[in-house]
Image (cartoon, rainbow, N blue to C red):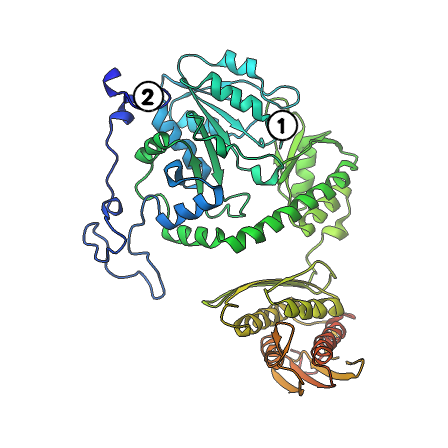
Amino acid sequence: MTTNKNQSASAIVNRARPEILAMKGYSSARSLQTGTDTSIFLDANECPFEPFIGAHNLARYPRQQPIKLAVAICDWLDISTRNLTVTRGADEAIECLMRAFCVPNTDNIVICPPTFAMYRQSAILHAVETREAPLNDSFGLDIAAIDKATDANTKMIFICSPNNPTGNVMARDDILSLCAAYADQALIVLDETYIQFAEASSLIPMIESTPNLVILRTLSKSHAAAGLRCGAAIARGEITQLLQKVLAPYPLASPVVDAALAILTSKNHQTLAAKRDALIERRDRFIPRLAALPMVDAILPSDANFILVRVQDADSFYATCLEAGIVVRNQSHQPGLANSIRISIGTEDEMNALVAALSGDTTESATDTARTGKVIRTTSETAISVSVNLDKASPVNISTGIGFYDHMLDQIAKHGGFSLEVECDGDLHIDAHHTVEDCAIALGQAIRTALGDKRGINRYGFMLPMDETLVTVALDLSGRFYLDFKADFPATHVGDLPTDMVPHFFYSLAEHMQANLHISVTGENAHHMVEACFKGFGRTIRQAVRREGSELPSTKGVL
């Protein structure tokens, strides 16, 4: 065994499996690419054509560690590429650690239950013994228990912080003391999957000064990309080299790389940070509501996007949720968690539905009759998500990148009396045209979807004065498209919205709602005139979509 050791490496690297230390890493086709300007690939038996029209870069194998993605992750985490191994979620990082360091049927790992089940699962698959050092009564690390569980064959100690399923952050000093105590013996694998929901800081800055510290991160939770399967292991360069030796030659599909790059832009980081803040605020608002339910005994403090609820009867609680179509996670099998349920924080509607189901109030959770529509529209110019609920007044959240346009869409929703959520990432560096048009298209499609068969609606609608301005709006949700728009705006812009896009907005909206729409506005102030059009339309559609019975408002029998 001593012949395989690297005399220049740290002691912890020489704790890796001797055959892995001795092994030469697999040379995949893309690993042999010598320069970024290589354009002819005849080395990997790939086909020289794409599999379908519109496909991009699917015919070629990706790199094991795609350069652009690695740089984007390094920018996010403020690390060097020498410290990074990109994997298929954090689960694959765990697998690679097992492969690189644990000798089957000889070595062991230590976990601190209650904790994430995959540490044990991976160990079982690799014929590695799992030893337990349970968390203390406060769900903190029990250093004495960890010391008692280890021996000369312990290769890794897994710590989840914030912990899954208890949701608490582990004491920083405890983690660093373990790193020091086991510096030459065992890796301290710190799973920071949920760290961006907590007020605590990541230990990533300690990587270079702590040779045996490995940190796991993923886009699954903090970046809302569980379906993407993209994670990372962050470690000293010598450990990174070992992990990439045992990593699959092509772990990341090209579409995954493209999507991850879209997620990791600076603008999207800001958007996601705001959404995490909103989720945390929602979590903190719903905890008292859930705690007040008679079947709930206590709710643990949480630094994550979930809560752990202690209940009187976990099986009954779970069954009640399931009957309402809501899936939660029963954690009663974990040590110290008898009658405990883990609940992820969902949307406002989902959390309201949960409380309603547990309260026995089926009216709040019923969604069968709700008139909702959601449209996801992606082009080379815009990416848009629009959601409407014609039977609720909130939430209303608009973000298109055009401030005055956001204000106008907000006027439609507020005066229309319905919930509207719009997110758009458009090519505003060119101009506002595509963003305005495509949002109108998506909004029209969403409203049309929400209207369903249109039974019971009023169908028609309104007029509205605004200071010196007068707007007349007539709407017929007929299923036929026609627009008549009359206006002479005295300015080219209102705020950052070009006034010539106002008739274009209503044209696209009416076309995709499949409605007759007549708008005529007169006035002297362009701001008032544009706002009157949007407010007038909002009031008109409020009247037109209101339900009064179940009759179809048409002699033809169809709209």
Which amino acid, by three-letter code, is at mark 2? Asn
**Real-space Cα separation, disc 2 to disc 1, in angstroms:** 40 Å
Q: Nearer the viewer, mark 2 or mark 1?
A: 2
Which amino acid, by three-letter code, is at mark 1? Ser
Nearer the observer, 50 or 257: 257
Numbered mark located on residue 14 in the image: 2
Q: How busy is the neighbourhood of tag 2: few (under 14 within 10 Å), some, or many (20 plus)?
A: some
Spot occupied by residue 390 in the image (x, y as percentages of width and height): 70, 65
- Say whether residue 333 is left or right of residue 93: right
Image quadrant where residue 524 sits: bottom right
Considering the image in quadrants, where does the C terminus appear?
bottom right
Picture residue at 35% right of the left edge, 48% below the top = 67
Image quadrant where residue 415 sits: bottom right
Picture residue at 53% right of the left edge, 68% below the top = 428
Residue lying at the far front in this picture: please name it.
209
Q: Quickly name the residue at label 1.
A: 332
Say which label, 2 or 1, has the lower sequence index. Answer: 2
SS category of the residue bearing label 1? loop
Picture residue at 34% right of the left edge, 66% below the top = 53
SS category of the residue bearing label 2? helix
Spot occupied by residue 479 in the image (x, y as percentages of width and height): 62, 79
Nearer the observer, 30 or 392: 30
Residue 235 shows in the view: yes
Image quadrant where residue 15 sits: top left
Spot occupied by residue 386 in the image (x, y as percentages of width and height): 60, 63
Whether 397 is drawn above or below 105: the answer is: below
Spot occupied by residue 140 in the image (x, y as percentages of width and height): 61, 23
Whether 235 is drawn above or below 556: the answer is: above
